[in-house]
Image (cartoon, coloured by chain):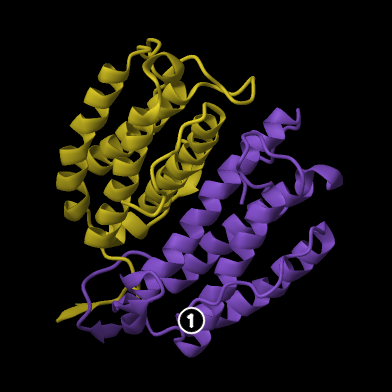
Chain colours: A yellow, B purple
Amino acid sequence: MTIHTMPAAVLTLDDLLTHWQGHRGLTRRVIEAFPEDALFSFTAAPPMRSFGELAWELQGLTDYCLKGLAQNDWSWQPPQEPDPKDRSALLTAWDAQTPRLAQALPLADPEWLMRKQEMAWGQLSPLETLLYAIDNENHHRGQGYVYLRALGIEPPAFYER
Amino acid sequence: MTIHTMPAAVLTLDDLLTHWQGHRGLTRRVIEAFPEDALFSFTAAPPMRSFGELAWELQGLTDYCLKGLAQNDWSWQPPQEPDPKDRSALLTAWDAQTPRLAQALPLADPEWLMRKQEMAWGQLSPLETLLYAIDNENHHRGQGYVYLRALGIEPPAFYER
């Protein structure tokens, strides 16, 4: 039995991790669904970025969350060098985050996660920041679905995680 | 002080409501950003549906969630008649859901919300179903951003809720 002073809440850290990793797995399948040459060159609506560039943004935002979870450091450092236009480099970086997230998130203190603090984008709780990163991934992945359809490719099923 | 036997969780019902309504407000602005004639006719990647048709799907899924929250009835009834290809009808239906959600969600029992049961799409908790509806909205709204860009229209800022 847990005794605490926090308001009743409904999402456990295990559930949040499963939810997040499920989204990340789906995004990985979308990255894989693109033809190699289209991943970093095609856009369905200029001036939108290619899906490969969007996916590197998602990878960077997950890195930001991992740094915040590990060190409570929420300063934003934009990438120093352009990301490689290379699917295998992207997938290697993506997969390296998976066990790090699985290790870091269950160790987070729930009260700390829910407490607002100064972030790169204003007063937010770590939880709000993580949910924003997940939402941003979902948002851009939905755009990747349009790119795939415009290329005549059936995207992975959205409901499969 | 709350004493209960649930595992520590991080998302309160108030936070979930704010999160959901924020997404719904953004989707409403995307609906409004389309030219009237394009909302139900344009697609950036055939055979994808128009954004108006996608938005009616989102409205239907929110109705499904509202019925589940009110009656614990998670059976799925597909729409009996085609949705009107009319923005004002869509926005009226959208806005009618806003106070219903605001009333229903804070009354939900957290333990019930987290308990899996038989749903139209398998063994899910009500919470998982609500999060799926929010994810599905985010996913399709991201597609609406591509449609707007393809029409040469600047979409609303994603981070404004």
Q: Residues within 10 Å of mark 1 (few under 14, many from 20)?
A: some
Task: Point out residue A143 in the picture as x, y percentages from the top left corner.
Answer: 53, 36
Asked whether residue A74 appears in the rendered view, the answer is: no
Q: Nearer the viewer, residue A119 or A151?
A: A151
Task: Tell which residue pokes out farthest to the bottom in this image.
Answer: B71
Label 1 SS: helix
Q: Chain of mark 1?
A: B
Residue under the point 48% across and 81% down: B68
Work out whether B2 lies above or below A11.
below
Q: Nearer the viewer, residue A61 or B129?
A: B129
Q: Is residue A85 left or right of residue A3?
A: right
Residue B99 in the image: state x and y as whole percent. Answer: 66, 76
Tell which of B44 and A91 is nearer to you.
B44
Q: How many marks?
A: 1
Q: Residue tagged by mark 1?
A: B68
Q: Is residue B110 above or below residue A37?
A: below
Which residue sits at x=35%, y=46%?
A: A23
Q: Position of residue A83 (x, y in %)?
A: 37, 14
> Can residue B21 be seen from the camera position used here?
yes
Where residue B154 appears, as percent x and y from the top left, is: 72, 32
Q: Amino acid at mark 1?
A: Gly
Residue at point 49%, 89% (across, down):
B71
